[in-house]
Image (tube, helix red, strand yellow):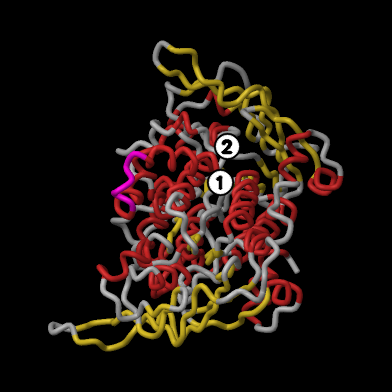
Amino acid sequence: MTDPLLSVHNLSVHFSQGEEEPVEAVKNISFEIGRGQTLALVGESGSGKSVSAMSVLKLLPYPKASHPTGEIFYDGNNLLNYTENQMRQLRGDKISVIFQEPMTSLNPLHTIQKQIGETLLLHRGLTGKQARSRILELLDLVGIPNPESRLNSYPHELSGGQRQRVMIAMALANDPELLIADEPTTALDVTIQEQILTLLQDLQNKLGMAILLITHDLNIVRRYAHHVCVMYQGELVETAATQQLFAQPEHPYTQKLINAEPSGMPTPTNHDTSPILETTDLKIWFPVKQGFFQRTVDHIKAVNQLDLTLLQGETLGVVGESGSGKTTLGLAILKLISSEGSIRFAGQELKDLDQKSVKPFRRKLQIVFQDPFGSLSPRMSVSEIIAEGLQIHHPESRDQHDMLIIEALREVGINPESRHRYPHEFSGGQRQRIAIARALVLKPELIILDEPTSALDRTVQKQIVELLRNLQLKYGLSYLFISHDLAVVKALSHRLLVMHHGNVVEQGPATDIFTSPQHPYTQKLLSAAFGL
């Protein structure tokens, strides 16, 4: 690569921890990015990707963080020798960052106009009409519809995709030469992901901008990066052009990453079994109230006249973008929110049951939530967390509880000896296994899985998918699998239900829908997920 814009040579990053040995987060890595090129840093959580990228702008928590070795040359200058004032001039001007989670990166107290205007004021001295004109131009550039109406909006008033577009607008405000994109699409739907990445690609072509893309999603890397650096436990284990890396990966870890895409077929099922779950004309409408007397003026139709059937031992995949009504559907089936229409579980109508009457059904109807760190109490040990359901539904057999907890942990691949530890002492994948054990210990018939793999690396996702398959085969479990990750849905689901704005636009056998989707929205989802 001739005349690189950014060159990193033998960079190491250590984090001091009191009197203990420092943690070696990054170990002697080297890479280069040319003007107009996209370099992807890939690897699992904890591999050192973000730490390496944040070193470029010196955004690590110094002096706790240090660089025992290395140089970072930008346009011929070693950034590690820059003063804080010099770095402040560079940040947001020549080098910009898009952070992973826009909701935490944007200031909740300031409007969109003020936040984008701040960077224009600092680096270009723009104020008043000039700043407003440039802000509108940027919002239009990143595809915000009717940008003038969004100037006085606050971050919480925008969708996830719109917030990410605002972050991109801020990053591009001063026409940077290098853009660091740290997992820019992790929390977004596949269609929004495609829009954001295509937007960045278009802007790169227009502006000649270099992009350092940090991600663990190899589908994104394959489609948008020119070169790839693979990181594992702080080390750079392989560097290659994108096509070459995917065609002939050399390092065993790279091969493992590429093969980590959830694959295989759903478990065999008996189609003669009876339905475990049926809904008819299910409606969940939330009233929109206005005025002093809070009169209902409209409704948000979260789920609208939905019919579904789930057979015993079968997986029904429920897919759609954020806001399509997937999670709302799951909560209504569990009677955690009110709904209209019929919900039948194992032939019994749940619609008119009060909370006391529905309690016996909760043992057979369990849920695994999206974020295990949020759904597992940090104040309770793993043993106490799993025992909660047993204490409610089987209080008479307390002597057997520990035995059942040990059995459930073994089923999900967690060492029972660790049951007295707390959730923060486990990895993300292990926490999700614990959440599955909590549901499994009650011997349920149906488990609602609400985005159970979305926060996990691909290698861990594959392990969880295989675990769910094995448990289904062993116990004849039925799953309602809610997700926007179509690769995972394809590996698990026998039937598919596609939701859009609260309505079912298509449903049927998963193989039929993945092979020949009929509805334009389904075709759009599959195209965004698999590049079809």
| Quadrant including the C terminus | bottom right
In terms of secondary structure, what is the magenta stretch mainly?
A: helix
In the rendering, which numbered label is found on residue 53? 2
Q: Give the range drawn in magenta.
A: 394-399
Q: Residue most toward the left?
A: 292
Q: Is mark 2 on a helix, strand or loop?
A: helix
Circle 1 residue: 182
Confirm or deny contact between disc 2 and disc 1 (CB under 8 A): yes
Which residue type carries mark 1?
Answer: Asp
308 lies left or right of 521: left
Q: Which of 25 and 381 is in front in this view?
A: 381
The x and y percentages for residue 319 are 57, 70
- Mark found first going from the N terminus, 2 or 1: 2
Residue 91 seen by the camera? no
The x and y percentages for residue 444 are 46, 59
20 lies left or right of 489: left
Image point 63% across, 21% down: which residue?
70
Q: In which quarter of the image is residue 232?
A: top right
| Quadrant including the N terminus | top right
Which residue type carries mark 2?
Answer: Ala
Q: Which of 2 and 30 is in front in this view?
A: 30
- Assess whether residue 495 is covered by the magenta stretch: no
